[in-house]
Amino acid sequence: LELLELSKIPNSIERTKRTQAYLRSLPPYPEPLPWLARGTPNRNTLPPKEPTPPPAPVLVLTPKQKIDLAPSIPTDDDLTDPIKERLYAQLPDATQRLVRAGNQFPQIAGVANALRDLTAVPFSEANILNIHLQLAVLTDVLAFDPDQPVAERLDADCKAAVVAVVRLLPPITMGHPDIDLLEQRNAEYARSKRAATVVEGERRVAGGLAEDENVATDQARAAAEIVAAAGDTGRVADFRTDFSRRIVMQLSIVVGALEGAVIGFVPGIAVGHAVNFLWLHRDAIMAMAVGWGESGWAWADYILLRVKQMRDDALKVE
């Protein structure tokens, strides 16, 4: 539990120094890390209690056991709100302006195109969570723009286009239960300080999902790419904390279903894609699990030991 104890050091300078010293003390690859060198748990061992699933975002498993974002369509209250639908009707023009103005700015181009596509459907079919995630990106861009090099800052036309969209979106998305839960969580994280190792672990897990078509749908991978690219602070970074935890918890469900079976294929080892993902990202998972409390850290440790056991079993089969 060294990382857990290090995360509790109140002084950031001292915490950083001691964390760096601890990381330097770890054995070089390919020697096993301390938490993976203790052997494997007995198959009948009851796992530690898993951490509480974050209320939002909701990640689900498809019939093919891939991670996907649960649909977040407008509620009946949203659909009967005359203001929301009227504002939504203004979005296509606003997003088209944003696309034109943001073409030369990489931090804007992607989100502008995404919003254009997301708002090209009737309001009753809109994906509120995905739209709100793009709003978070735009809000972060505006907040951090003054800190960018002069040559990379938004020009007046692009900034005006961003502001126009940012003004339209909150009245549309706020009030939806998924968004209200998400904002509540983000406010809690904004008031807390997460260790740099925890943040980096979250980023690596989200980034891994964005690149792995075997474990996630295109929609989930697109969201993962957005949150992985965010900085250490900001609205999207706060969203990443719950998103990355959900990834590990969903894949642990797949791992539980795979126990005793040999499916999928990894070069040299026949195991499921979920097992492979968790193994490849084991260091990042244990780093981010520090933020889940002692029981959550123990749960992640247990899951990875079971993953190691499954890989060892697969090697024996081959």
Image: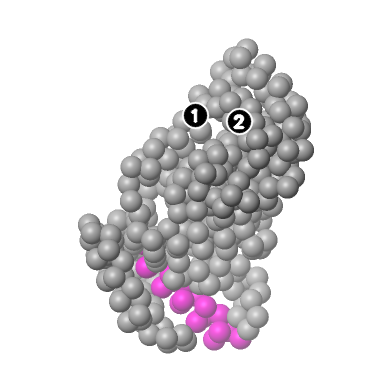
Which residue position holds label 2?
163
The residue depicted at 50 percent of the width and 69 percent of the height is 281
Which label is found at residue 30? none
Question: In what quadrant of the picture does the N terminus appear?
Answer: bottom left
Q: Is residue 38 magenta?
A: no
Judge the density around disc 1: few (<14), some (14-19), many (≥20) Cα neighbours within 10 Å.
some
Which residues fall within the magenta stretch? 299-318
Closer to viewer: mark 1 or mark 2: 2
Q: Residue 148: horizontal and vertical position, in percent?
A: 54, 50
Which label is found at residue 177? 1
Q: Could one spot residue 258 in this view of the protein?
A: no
* C-alpha distance separating marks 1 and 2: 25 Å
Q: Quadrant of residue 72?
A: top right
The residue depicted at 56 percent of the width and 80 percent of the height is 314
Of callouts 1 and 2, the N-terminal one: 2
- Amino acid identity at mark 1: Pro
Q: Is residue 316 magenta?
A: yes
